[in-house]
Image: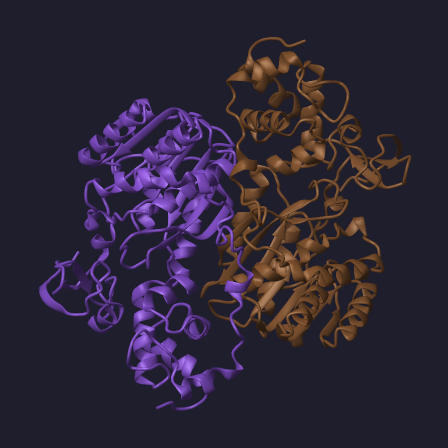
Chain colours: A brown, B purple
Amino acid sequence: MINGDLAGLLTAVAEAVGLQEGESGVERVLRAIRELEPASTKAVSRHVGLPLPVIAAINNELRTRGVVTTNRPSRLTDAGRTLLESLPIDLSAAATCQSCDGHSVEIPADFDPVLERLALIMESAPGVDLTLDQSFATVETKVRRVLLLMRYGLLPSRAALCVGDDDLMAVAIAAVGAAIDRPLVQRLAVVDISPEILEYTRSCLAELGVTAELVEHDLREPLPEPLRKGFDLALTDPPYTTEGAGLFLSRAVEALVPGPGRSVVFSFGPKGPANTLQVQRVITELGLTVQAMHRNFNEYLGAGIIAGVSHLQYLSTTAETAPLVEGAHAGPLYTADQRSAAREYVCNGCATRYAVGRDAEWPTIAALKEAGCAQCGGDRFRPLQLIRDK
Amino acid sequence: MINGDLAGLLTAVAEAVGLQEGESGVERVLRAIRELEPASTKAVSRHVGLPLPVIAAINNELRTRGVVTTNRPSRLTDAGRTLLESLPIDLSAAATCQSCDGHSVEIPADFDPVLERLALIMESAPGVDLTLDQSFATVETKVRRVLLLMRYGLLPSRAALCVGDDDLMAVAIAAVGAAIDRPLVQRLAVVDISPEILEYTRSCLAELGVTAELVEHDLREPLPEPLRKGFDLALTDPPYTTEGAGLFLSRAVEALVPGPGRSVVFSFGPKGPANTLQVQRVITELGLTVQAMHRNFNEYLGAGIIAGVSHLQYLSTTAETAPLVEGAHAGPLYTADQRSAAREYVCNGCATRYAVGRDAEWPTIAALKEAGCAQCGGDRFRPLQLIRDK
């Protein structure tokens, strides 16, 4: 049952969920549901750029208030539709370029063999380690990233470093280079904590006839000397926290030839306004300028809280650029490190674990059930032990 | 005649021009000339995103050193081509989406009448006042902006304000709305210093059957009370200085409903790394987050120093958003205010005036001649009086 008017609903839901984005955030969600219905939580999350748990919590409130149907995926109830009549229609699908889906680069039709090759490579790749905030970008995302770097003249490059590469971007760059018969990087290097990923990268690159420096290293520690100050381009898709962004960007900066005009390609998921501003402050304090920012450029397979998308930023160095973190990093880094007084839940279907609690990725078990398991889609979970306090 | 190797050339030219972007900037220019040749100064400027006077000065140095031909538009000499062999090929044109030219929105074919209507409107519009850093965005840019706002769900909007509107964006929004038979803004307002522009906007909107609040006001002064805290969206294409950006963005923020999730669409031309970082600091200090940044999105007719392009940023408010400038602004604002000890030159062909001097938009008369007059293309200029010191 709906009480009060639209403005009252927006306020009540924003307050019930504790939404940083406030009433305008709830409004965007309602508009997205109307645009997309039947609207899965994931589709709404991608559309409005809010994390999956937030959308799930809002959906839950809207359901309680009779604005959306109890069955899923979400639809507006008749009462909800009436209430929304004064809200402007969403025209985004009609306005977006159909050829490139708004990404500004289009995968050429004759790239099918590259996509197939990378798909095979991903099938045999080492599994994702969720505790390290890993998730795999789709094959299309990897190829589009390479094209975007070409578009901005960052590839071909004399020297490029992947700062963490569970995404196998080094392999994607080599595969596209092979497809267009042009080596895209003269000096290619990867630094990663995982020996499995490095070994797999080595074997994939060997098949493509590409050699690279593959360095096993924990990025909490400063870069090894041979990787410092030698690259024109660094790519990173860091752990999903402000600390993770600051640390990996600092390491990226360490790797670059000093001086202006070097480039960092930085992928990072949508955060609430306060966290987004914090990361922007970090970027600015690093003396990096935002040359381009592509919303929802990266799509991931089964990535939980970011609803499978993240933004891609092309950053450029200035004369003021310097790392923020110079020594070792000891504080929290991964999303899991930031949970306090949370309880772990495990999916009955596939045993994937989720932290649920006030400061955890999932504020309530209702929100997690609403969204469903990121891996298998199941909506049944059982509680495990409390996660240690920090 | 070329002395030394490529690295030596890059260093020498970067030093001779005093290029903030350093050697990597010179390299990008050389790669662009090779990609585009015959390459006009303007085309190179757009391609690499450096101001026209900078490209002209680099071209001049490259000519002196025998790397590019003396006739124009620039081509590499044979010696130059040999020297550049080790530089990676530029693949940007091949990678960019052909349908939308990388803009992520495509003007539908059935929008021809809108483009024609806006072209007619622009033909009769009040002339550009260069001392106010005005220049007209092309008709295609205006329409693409409206589409981009639709793509991001910022249009349709309940309440939108144009903070300065020599570009007639209010008219463009109304024209697109008429074409798709959907009012795009419920409350539309324009604040501008020019009574001519406001009167012209009024008459154009009247023909389109749209009413708007049109307020004559010098944005150096705080917004009039009726325009404060009432809008969801503000559009601005401010004077081309850090002060101009900070002031107009502050006024935009004043206009928005307080709280997170309100939007500012901010167009600003490419600057050197130091200035770009400064503007980014201003954005961050305003508590605004960069939701999207489209390089070279805006194209202008006959805009001098920015080579006819600027970037478009979609900014979003947070709980921390507040204006940086609250009272009246007394300092420098427009590009012309920032020139010291410069001399004015006037084009022999069309009498357009240019400031030439160390801190002026044109560092040397050679650079101005190299680029040619932004209005008529002429390359003959005569000196006028010295511009007053600040």
| Residue at the (70%, 27%) spot, across then down | A38
Q: Is residue A362 above or below residue A236?
A: above
Whole-percent x, y for residue B260 in the image: 51, 31
Residues A312 and A389: in front is: A312
Tell whether A36 sits left or right of B319: right
Whole-percent x, y for residue A226 in the image: 66, 77
Q: Quadrant of residue A24?
A: top right
Whole-percent x, y for residue A58 in the image: 67, 25
Residue B300 visible somewhere in the drawing:
yes
Tell whether A253 sits left or right of A354: left
Q: Quadrant of residue A272?
A: top right
Whole-percent x, y for residue A39 in the image: 69, 29
| Residue at the (32%, 23%) spot, across then down | B209
Could you tell me how many numbered marks the image carries?
A: 0
Indicate the quadrant containing the C terminus of chain A: top left, top right, bottom left or bottom right: top right
Indicate the quadrant containing the N terminus of chain A: top left, top right, bottom left or bottom right: top right
Q: Quadrant of residue A173?
A: bottom right
Q: Is residue A229 above or below residue B136?
A: below
| Residue at the (70%, 67%) spot, across then down | A175
Extreme residue toward the left, this view: B385
Q: Is residue A59 above or below residue B322?
A: above
Residues A106 and B153: in front is: A106
Residue A322 visible somewhere in the drawing:
no
